[in-house]
Every structure is written in C-alpha cells, then in structure tokens.
C-alpha cells in the first residue's frame, strides 16, 4: 500500500436511475484500489443502501427535486465514503430496529453489518452518512 490518498466525488439527481449510476461509479473507483475483494463488496453494499435511502427518503413526493453527493476517499488503512443529501426525511422514514422482521427500513441495519463504521447525521439542512471500512491489500 502507498501513503497516497485517493479521492473521488460526484453529485447526481436523487432518482433511482442515478442511484444505479452512483453504485457503478463507486464500483469502478474501488476496482482501481489495492483492496481485498471482500472489503470492496462490503463497501459497495453499504454505499448502495445509503444512496438508495437518500434517493427514496430525502426528497419525498413525485415532483420533489434534489441531489445526492457521493464522496469517496482512501487512506493508508481504510476506505471512506460519504453520502450526503440536502432533503428533509419524512417521519415515516425511520430505520427498523435491529432484529426486526420489518420488510422495509432495513438499510441502516445492513450498512452497520456491512462496514466497520457508520455515522449518520440528520440536520435541518440534510443527512450525511459516513462509512468507513478497514482495508487489506488485495492478495
């Protein structure tokens, strides 16, 4: 591994088709890093959930418009991802409790199970989900 910090950022409209594009961008970016396959897949799972949540919950309503920002950076020993929206989550968008059998609202639980660290900050100006995964070199 090198000490170089890799960085990528993209801002997309908060729509389902753009969520798919953001997942592909994250996959392409991670493919170029010296990281083991299991860690790569764990990060992609958590990124997918965070992006889908932002697209679905941050801008409720059929005519709502907004953006989702995806920022990825790599440190010597970890991969970090930040997913940010500027929307207002509805009260009905709270996550399911761990161990719940709910069919919806499991994205936060899945994120926590996928990567080493998840931090979520809801404010009046939007929501940020920060993900961190320790990385081992591919080998």
Image: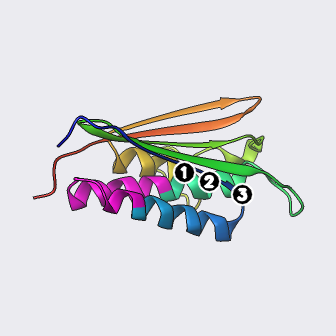
The residue that label 3 is drawn on is: 14
The residue that label 2 is drawn on is: 53
Position of residue 22 in the picture relative to residue 131 (left or right): right
> Residue 111 location, x and y as percent?
44, 49
- Tell me, yes or no, whether the two marked residues, 1 and 2, touch with CB atoms within 8 Å: yes
Secondary structure under tag 1 reads helix
Residue 101 appearing in the image = no
Dot 3 or dot 2: first in sequence order is 3
Residue 31 appearing in the image = yes
What whole-number distance in Å separates the C-alpha atoms at marks 3 and 1?
A: 12 Å
> Residue 92 location, x and y as percent?
73, 47
**Residue shown at the point (90%, 61%) measured from the top left:** 63
Q: Note whether 28 is above or below 59 in the view shown.
A: below
Identify the disc placed on residue 50.
1
> Residue 73 location, x and y as percent?
41, 41
Position of residue 43 in the picture relative to residue 83 (left or right): left
Position of residue 113 in the picture relative to residue 61 (left or right): left
Image quarter of the N terminus? top left
Secondary structure under tag 2 reads helix
* Part of the protein shown in magenta: 29-47
What whole-number distance in Å separates the C-alpha atoms at marks 3 and 2?
A: 10 Å
């Amino acid at each position: 591994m090198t000490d170089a910090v890799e960085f990528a950022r993209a801002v997309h409209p908060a729509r389902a088709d753009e969520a798919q594009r953001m997942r592909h961008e994250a996959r392409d970016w991670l493919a170029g890093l010296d990281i083991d396959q299991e860690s790569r897949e764990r990060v992609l799972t958590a990124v997918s959930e965070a992006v889908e949540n932002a697209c679905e919950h941050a801008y409720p309503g059929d005519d709502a418009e907004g953006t989702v920002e995806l920022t990825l950076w790599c440190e010597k020993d970890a991969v970090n991802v930040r997913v940010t929206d500027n929307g207002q989550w509805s009260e009905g968008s709270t996550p399911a409790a761990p161990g719940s059998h709910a069919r919806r609202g499991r994205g936060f639980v899945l994120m926590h199970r996928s990567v080493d660290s998840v931090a979520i900050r809801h404010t009046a100006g939007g929501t940020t989900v920060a993900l961190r995964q320790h990385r081992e070199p591919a080998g």
